[in-house]
Image (cartoon, coloured by chain):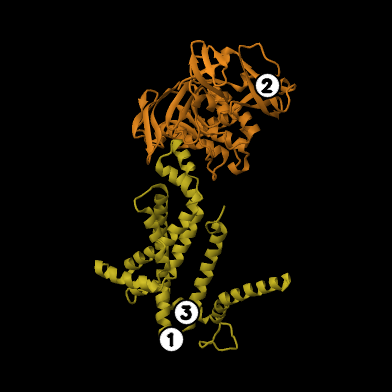
């Protein structure tokens, strides 16, 4: 186990900057989620740490030692690929044993460790199966077992759950987290699914156009996204812009967002309240309810305000009194106003 | 036309193809067991020609030379062709596309022309006629087939498999032997069969590049026919057909000719 750091990592493909001077520390034993839209450089960063991508500038350190001259096979990493990349000609046990075999681990110890790790991923009885005889979730767990059996210093996961359907994905998220906790290995995890990143990670880093936009614990980043991109990428956000006044932010329709200190603020959909009568809250505005979307326990209201589309999310029964369409009041607490830079 | 008549026509067509493919071979095989040296009927069974063949040192030597040359060519062409395919697959070598495009014309160029060109070229650079020249020529002819077949198989290979093996600590050679080669093995076997066939079947290049009196079987058969046909040729051809058909059928079953596993 080791801390992983990247310093000033830069990589260009043609004219496109895949990584632009990214500096980031991945704490020892932590679960770090790399998040960003496609083409943001998150996979390139992961592959640079693995050694598949050679950066033009900057360096990667694993446990304080720079690894630019260390080839992939000597970096002592474990990696789970998006396609799982299980060897089709080998059984589950042979797949898992591969890393031990190339390290010349004696056969008896090899068998013991393979059995142990298959037990850990709850695939004990499946050792003799071939990969094509397994379900998607089982393959994912074989890939995981194969990556951790060699006790690597760092575990790299490249969108490991994206090939699974929604229900299985949630189940595997819990599994992944449990396995990572039990093994206590430094884990770096690439995903474009923000919910997944929030669920799994101790810390997240958000990339955009090859640059690190934001880094921190998920809750801290969610509560204080600092810029509009992060606010919208991590969760959903309603943005309000206006003119700053001594008392707050004056919006286009004359409403004052008391206490706001930036020209643009965000409000999370779950913090917006909708009412038919004028609410007592100090921050309130008139909007037009356009649509109510029922989605089981939760409901979403789509509203028009000053030509912009806003979203409010709540328990569906909170919206029960609302008409299908019409003028309503929107309000929120001053504490839920998120200041945004730029 | 009804569906049934179409189906019948189709079957008849397929039957005709098989007749024209196999009837001459069957006739030849039958005649190798006929006592008459001039293919006269009525048929009277005899193994005379096989006995004569067994004592014909010239034919046996040529047959043996053909077999071992084909084996050497198969090993050389398959090994170098597979290595070339993997290299072309893994690396972006400058001029890679051009190189790959240049692999196809030799398959289409008539062997007579390739053979003439080789004779002139080998003479020019000082490689004398003889078995090494024959082997070199055969390998050059067989190589494109191997590369084309193995490359086709590699196209179905997930590059993440090699990366996974490397991430698990395998050195490049181990990655190749444990992960890449097992996947492309059907392609390698099929490519090897092509290489064997190209060499064993080869007349023109062998004729041009071998020394008189030290020839391969196809060249010997050709020269014997010019001198006068003997049913010994039928006998040796029948043996060759029996052996090569057996090998081909086995290989087809095993490798499915580079198709899906």
Please indicate, yes or no, whether residue B128 appears anywhere in the rendered image: no
Q: What is the secondary structure assignment of the residue under circle 1? A: loop
Q: Nearer the viewer, residue A73 or A223?
A: A223
> Vertical placement of A135 versus A242: above or below?
below
Say yes or no: labels 3 and 1 on the same chain: yes
Please indicate, yes or no, whether residue A231 appears anywhere in the rendered image: yes
Q: Which residue does the numbered mark 2 point to in the structure image?
A: A328
Q: Circle 1 marks a residue in which chain?
A: B
> Vertical placement of A262 versus A232: above or below?
above
Q: Position of residue A146 (x, y in %)?
A: 52, 34
Q: Is residue B72 left or right of residue A263?
A: left
Q: Residues within 10 Å of mark 3 (few under 14, many from 20)?
A: many
Q: Nearer the viewer, residue A3 or A249?
A: A249
Q: Which residue does the numbered mark 3 point to in the structure image?
A: B233
Q: Circle 2 marks a residue in which chain?
A: A
Quadrant of res A83: top right
Q: What is the secondary structure assignment of the residue under circle 3? A: helix
Residue at screen point 38% across, 63% down: B139
In the image, the chain rendered in yellow is: B
Q: Position of residue A77 (x, y in %)?
A: 45, 31
Q: CA distance from mark 3 to mark 2?
A: 101 Å
Q: Which residue does the numbered mark 1 point to in the structure image?
A: B228
In the image, the chain rendered in orange is: A
Q: Circle 3 marks a residue in which chain?
A: B
């Amino acid at each position: 186990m080791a801390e992983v750091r990247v310093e000033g990592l830069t990589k260009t493909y043609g004219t496109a900057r895949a990584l632009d001077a990214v500096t980031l520390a991945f704490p020892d034993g932590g679960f770090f989620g790399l998040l960003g839209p496609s083409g943001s450089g998150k996979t390139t960063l992961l592959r640079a740490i693995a050694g598949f991508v050679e950066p033009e500038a900057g360096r990667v350190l694993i446990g304080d030692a720079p690894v630019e001259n260390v080839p992939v096979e000597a970096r002592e990493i474990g990696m789970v690929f998006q396609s799982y990349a299980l060897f089709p000609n080998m059984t589950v046990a042979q797949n898992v044993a591969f890393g031990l075999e190339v390290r010349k681990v004696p056969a008896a110890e090899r068998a013991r460790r393979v059995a142990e790790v298959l037990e850990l991923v709850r695939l004990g009885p499946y050792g003799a199966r071939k990969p094509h005889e397994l379900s998607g979730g089982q393959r994912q767990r074989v890939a995981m077992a194969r990556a951790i059996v060699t006790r690597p210093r760092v575990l790299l996961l490249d969108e490991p759950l994206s090939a699974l359907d929604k229900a299985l994905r949630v189940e595997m998220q819990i599994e992944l987290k449990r396995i990572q906790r039990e093994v206590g290995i430094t884990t770096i995890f690439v995903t474009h699914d923000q919910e997944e990143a929030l669920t799994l990670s101790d810390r997240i880093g958000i990339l955009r156009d090859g640059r690190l936009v934001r880094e921190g614990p998920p809750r801290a980043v969610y509560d204080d996204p600092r810029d509009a991109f992060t606010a919208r990428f991590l969760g959903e956000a309603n943005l309000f812009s206006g003119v700053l006044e001594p008392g707050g932010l004056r919006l286009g329709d004359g409403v004052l967002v008391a206490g706001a200190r930036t020209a643009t603020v965000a409000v999370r959909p779950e913090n917006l309240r909708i009412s038919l009568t004028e609410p007592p809250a100090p921050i309130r505005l008139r909007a037009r309810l356009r649509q109510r979307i029922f989605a089981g326990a939760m409901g979403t209201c789509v509203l028009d305000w000053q030509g912009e589309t806003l979203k409010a999310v709540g328990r569906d029964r909170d919206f029960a009194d609302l008409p299908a369409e019409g003028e309503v009041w929107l309000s929120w607490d001053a504490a839920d106003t998120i200041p945004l830079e730029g | 036309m009804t569906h049934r008549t179409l189906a019948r026509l189709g079957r008849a067509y397929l039957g005709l193809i098989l007749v024209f493919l196999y009837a001459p071979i069957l006739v030849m095989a039958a005649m190798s067991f006929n006592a008459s040296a001039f293919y006269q009927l009525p048929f009277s069974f005899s193994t005379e020609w096989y006995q004569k063949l067994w004592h014909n040192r010239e034919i046996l030597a040529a047959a043996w030379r053909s077999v071992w040359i084909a084996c050497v060519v198969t090993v050389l062409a398959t090994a170098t062709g597979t290595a070339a395919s993997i290299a072309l697959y893994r690396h972006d070598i400058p001029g890679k596309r051009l190189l790959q495009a240049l692999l196809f014309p030799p398959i289409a160029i008539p062997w007579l022309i390739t053979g003439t060109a080789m004779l002139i070229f080998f003479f020019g650079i000082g490689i004398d006629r003889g078995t090494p020249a024959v082997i070199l020529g055969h390998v050059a002819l067989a190589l494109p087939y191997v590369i084309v077949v193995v490359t086709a198989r590699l196209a179905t290979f997930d590059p993440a498999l090699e990366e996974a093996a490397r991430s698990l600590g395998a050195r490049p050679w181990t990655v190749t032997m444990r992960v890449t080669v097992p996947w492309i093995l059907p392609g390698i076997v099929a490519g090897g069969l092509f290489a064997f066939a190209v060499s064993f079947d080869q007349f023109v290049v062998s004729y041009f590049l071998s020394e008189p009196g030290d020839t391969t079987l196809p060249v010997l058969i050709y020269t014997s026919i010019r001198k006068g046909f003997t049913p010994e040729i039928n006998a040796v051809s029948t043996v060759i057909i029996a052996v090569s058909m057996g090998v081909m059928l086995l290989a087809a079953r095993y490798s499915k000719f580079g198709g899906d596993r």
